[in-house]
Amino acid sequence: MRRLPVYLLLDTSGSMKGEPIQAVNVGIQALVSSLRQDPNALESVYISIITFDREVKEILPLTELSMLQVPHIDTPDSGPTHLGEALAFLNKRFNTDIIKSTPSQKGDWAPLLFIMTDGKPSDLMVFREEVPKIKAKSFGNIVACGAGPKAKAEFLQEITDNVAMLENTDSSTFQQYFKWVSSTVQQGSRSAGVTSNEMELPPPPSEVNIVI
């Protein structure tokens, strides 16, 4: 069975401490249980979770949806937002994780990438180096989400045209956002096989503002 890899890159810098990170944990639980109810997703979706603050951690390597144990995500008390380092890490993982098609076997479907941050990259030089490499990879779609009033859409727009902004970082907003991520992944698992960047996004809920 061909896989649909889904990468979640999540900001765990100090400003996400408290309600925001609790809301993210609840949102991811909801995302996984919603996907498990979809037979297409259950057969094809593999999820990886990478967090970034001053360190980058792969807290869930690419794992089959049915086998996945949702990890608990925590944040340090304070610290920078190393989004550039996270993209560098993902670039390496992409090269080792993704199964390419060969004459004798079909490889993975084009992976989906969801990035969430409540600020802006602290490591701007690395960020600017890594963005073109990420864009050159064959992602089926990249969706970047800025959460809360301090998130800067302009940096996310350097990575992708699909930028969503959340005004609040409370649990109901995050729940709606992850529900939308779930619909996007389900759509991806149904239309697996579209070429890079052709996958349409489902209509977002009112809490999610798409930046045009």
Image (cartoon, grey):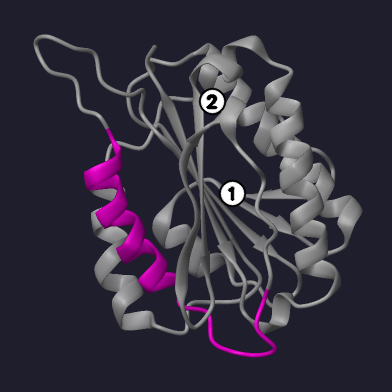
Direction from residue 187 to residue 22 in the image, left or right: right
Residue tagged 1: 212
- Residue 151 coordinates in the image, percent (x, y): 65, 72
Direction from residue 43 to residue 85 in the image, left or right: left
In front here: 154 or 132? 132
- SS for dot 2: loop
Residue at (72% x, 37% y) in the render: 31
The residue range painted magenta reads: 75-98
Residue tagged 2: 200
Compared with residue 196, is residue 47 higher up or lower down, i.e. above or below? below
Residue at (37% x, 62% y) in the render: 87
- Residue 114 coordinates in the image, percent (x, y): 54, 48
- Residue 65 coordinates in the image, percent (x, y): 58, 29
- Residue 209 coordinates in the image, percent (x, y): 73, 50
Compared with residue 105, is residue 126 higher up or lower down, i.e. above or below? below
Circle 2: residue type: Glu
Question: Is residue 6 inside the magenta stretch?
Answer: no
Mark 1 or mark 2: which comes first in sequence? 2
In front here: 202 or 30? 30
The answer to which image quadrant residue 137 occupies is top left
- SS for dot 1: loop
**How busy is the neighbourhood of tag 1: few (under 14 within 10 Å), some, or many (20 plus)?**
few
Tally the numbered discs.
2
Residue at (75% x, 57% y) in the render: 24
Q: Which mark is residue 176?
A: none
Direction from residue 57 to residue 68 in the image, left or right: right
Q: Looking at the figure, which quarter contains the N terminus? A: top left
Direction from residue 146 to residue 204 in the image, left or right: right
Circle 1: residue type: Ile
